[in-house]
Amino acid sequence: MTNSETKATLSFSDGSPSIEMPIYKGSIGPDVIDIRKLYGATGKFTYDPGFMSTAACNSSITYIDGDKGELLYRGYPIEQLAQNGGDFLESCYLLLNGELPNAEQKEKFVETVTKHTMVHEQMQFFFRGFRRDAHPMSVLVGTVGALASFYHDSLDINDAHHREVSAIRLIAKMPTLVAMAYKYSIGQPFVYPRNDLSYSANFMYMMFSNPCEPYKVNEVLVRALDRILVLHADHEQNASTSTVRLAGSSGANPFACIAAGIACLWGPAHGGANEAALSMLEEIGSVDNIAHFIEQVKDKNSGVKLMGFGHRVYKNYDPRAKLMRETCYEVLNELGLQDDPLFKLAMALEKIALEDEYFVSRKLYPNVDFYSGIVQRALGIPTALFTGIFALARTVGWVAQWKEMISDPEQKIGRPRQLFVGSPKRDVPAMDKR
Ligand code: SDX
């Protein structure tokens, strides 16, 4: 970032002395006002619940232009990466290293990731402690955190090699753990990874093969899953990425930080929205019920939200939602499900919402979660696992952002302040005086 000539001057109506603060320009996107000296100079904090106007860091990984509906991974538009930028591991290499790999770099990266897909054999005992119907995100929070107990050789966050090894281990092992969570939930044996399959094909194999019969990889479905992973790989400083950065700022090991990110992603306002959006479509049931549902959404007292719609940053169509809808078509056509009622219902709901003043005035558009549930359901992925797939994809983004933060000379432990509105100091009364 570069310091700009213009500065911000903050003046006070109560006659307190005004202060000047530097403004920094990024390569693209909004400038920032450096307020780090504000408290020291004025004894005042800024107040920004939900960080609506606060940049918590500088980053060169992902950029979103919410008004244009633009998403760039290291400068490359998501449309190009999803359609002709190669597969998910190429996007992983890009997010981690800043450039797309050439053929030799890609081959080496794929080989390295492939060789780390197995988990320690004792990991299976952690699964045994869960109920079979445990939500997969509870299993992933537990098992990803538990990885730290096996990899004492890569926990020194100040060692660049340790950081690199941990990054590869996390990217490589997430598909194995997600597939194990699924197999455990249906009482089938865990399936070991296969090194002769691509990353996404291997995941589908570990999810859907069983020891009793050969498994045939469907390349159309594998490509669809791979695109879902590319679309979910990173997304600036969203809630779960900010959680990973905050955990990492204390020096916590990368496995603990990613477990924290998984916990945050679980929420229905964030990564849990794909599961909630599909449940919403199933609850609406038919096009005839859309009008009544929309009325409920508009009634603030109902607490009903249009899941898969709206976004803190996108005030235009989420570019990932467009690509996800295309993937929907491809998968449903491949499976002969063109008339899938939920997909037709989703498109009807989207059309009505995009023409309704309530949503238009609030700039509420479909986000990545609106269609992803339909695609994943068509791929045979159970609803409860949708957010686990999101976590699988986002692990590379979390890890890339975590690595960037650790290497940032400006980084300090994250410790927000507050506006205190509680009781001033008072004395403890004796019991008979309470
Ligand atoms: C993800 O940050 C990221 O980048 C996240 C993500 C990523 O890749 O990491 O993109 C992934 O989390 C996508 C978002 C998935 N969540 C959902 O689909 C859940 C439904 N969406 C809403 O909960 C909401 O839109 C949020 C949480 C996504 C955004 O919330 P904001 O920015 O705080 O929006 P807001 O609450 O300020 O809404 C502004 C207005 C409000 O109405 P008014 O008070 O102005 O009258 O829009 C309304 C809201 O009530 N509104 C909705 C709505 N979302 C916002 N009304 C109905 N349905 C919705 N979905």
Image (cartoon, rainbow, N blue to C red):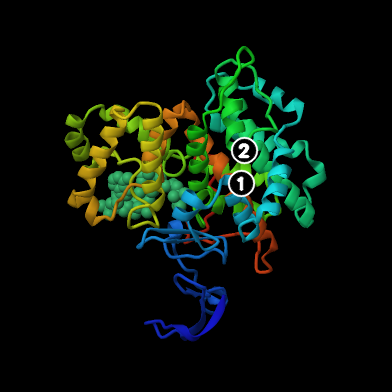
Instruction: From the image, tell me which residue sits under label 2.
Output: 199
Residue kind at label 2, given as amino acid type: Tyr
Classify mark 1: residues with Cα within 10 Å, few (<14), some (14-19) or many (20+).
Answer: many
Identified at 31% across, 28% down, the residue is 340
Q: How many marks?
A: 2
308, 15: nearer the viewer: 308
Q: Quadrant of residue 128?
A: top right
Q: Is residue 27 above or below residue 329?
A: below
**Could you tell me residue 284's position as x and y percent?**
26, 30
Specify the label residue 257 is tagged with: none
Q: In whole angstroms, how far apart are the C-alphas of marks 2 and 1?
A: 7 Å
**Could you tell me residue 312's position as x and y percent?**
39, 55
32, 111: nearer the viewer: 111
User: Is label 1 in a helix, a strand or a loop?
Assistant: helix
Residue kind at label 1, given as amino acid type: Leu
Identified at 50% across, 69% down, the residue is 45
Q: Is residue 268 above or below residue 218?
A: below
Q: Is residue 378 visible?
A: yes
Identified at 49% across, 53% down, the residue is 238
Q: Is residue 300 visible?
A: no
**Could you tell me residue 365's position as x and y percent?**
31, 50
**Could you tell me residue 387's position as x and y percent?**
49, 36
Q: Is residue 269 above or below residue 22?
A: above
Query: Do the numbered discs 2 and 1 sit on residues whose CB atoms are within 8 Å?
Result: yes
Q: Is residue 237 left or right of residue 367?
A: right
Instruction: From the image, tell me which residue sits under label 1.
Output: 89
